Image (cartoon, rainbow, N blue to C red):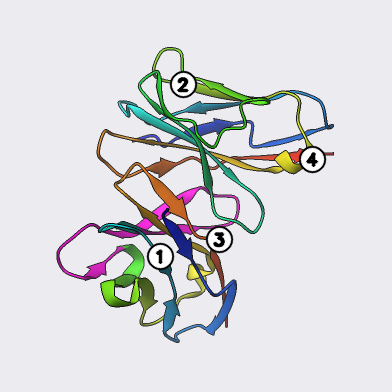
Amino acid sequence: AQSVTQPDIHITVSEGASLELRCNYSYGATPYLFWYVQSPGQGLQLLLKYFSGDTLVQGIKGFEAEFKRSQSSFNLRKPSVHWSDAAEYFCAVGANNNDMRFGAGTRLTVKP
Amino acid sequence: EAGVAQSPRYKIIEKRQSVAFWCNPISGHATLYWYQQILGQGPKLLIQFQNNGVVDDSQLPKDRFSAERLKGVDSTLKIQPAKLEDSAVYLCASSSRTGEQFFGPGTRLTVL
């Protein structure tokens, strides 16, 4: 069965510092992988997704993620965090666009 | 384009009462999803519609939850009777046949 683990419940970084959010997945075949962001009171917004091809994926808002099959990981990175990046981040795995299982999320706090 | 609309945004009810949520997907999107997001967890798929047919309702607690999408556009999700553990945010999403899921802002349900 497919599943997603986000080991960090809460991360605090200083504005301007780099960010890496971890995601590990369990899936029997080549997965579709996603990162979503959820601001308070808002729905989820897709940051980026991986289906195949280049394992380094660029997304919106300056985010990128790298698919590492050997580690079953799909970590999200950003070189310089802005205060507006404070939100909840969800990793998801699926067989396609339409069948996703979400992790429990990582809450990001940005210190001034 | 207009996004996914949901109403109400907030609802407070007593346990054993009934409640209904409404979702209007993005125009032209054939696929509609209802998710339940309990505080501190990622969204969990409750039901997926393709036009007005159910594709997946394996995680819908059918003894108390029901959903319909009569004309293949708007959808309603009903809980009857509600339990304390139903307190959550209920998210609606829609997608074109093979495309990205777009999420609405959600309905926050509190059951007292």
Disc 1/disc 2 C-alpha distance (Å): 33 Å
Q: Nearer the viewer, mark 1 or mark 4?
A: 1
Residue topped by disc 4? B84
Of tags 3 and 1, the one toward the viewer is 1
The residue positioned 57% from the left and 33% from the top of the image is: B60
Question: Residue B71's image quarter?
Answer: top left
Eyeballing the image, is A62 above or below A16?
above
Q: Which residues are magenta?
A: A34-59
Q: Residue furthest top?
A: B71
Using the rendered image, report if marks 4 and 3 lie on a common chain: no
Expressed as whole percent of the image width and height from the top left, the position of residue A73 reads: 36, 72
Are discs 2 and 4 both within one chain? yes
Which numbered dot is residue A104?
A: 3
Disc 3 residue crowd, few under 14, some 14–19, many 20+, Cα 10 Å: many
Instruction: Please give the chain letter of the residue carrying mark 3.
Output: A
Q: Could you tell me which residue is drawn at 31 percent across and 45 percent down?
A: A97
In x, y percent, where is residue B41?
60, 56
> Can marks 3 and 1 be said to lie on one chain?
yes
The residue closer to the viewer here, A70 or A8, is A70
**Numbered circle sitting on residue A25:** 1
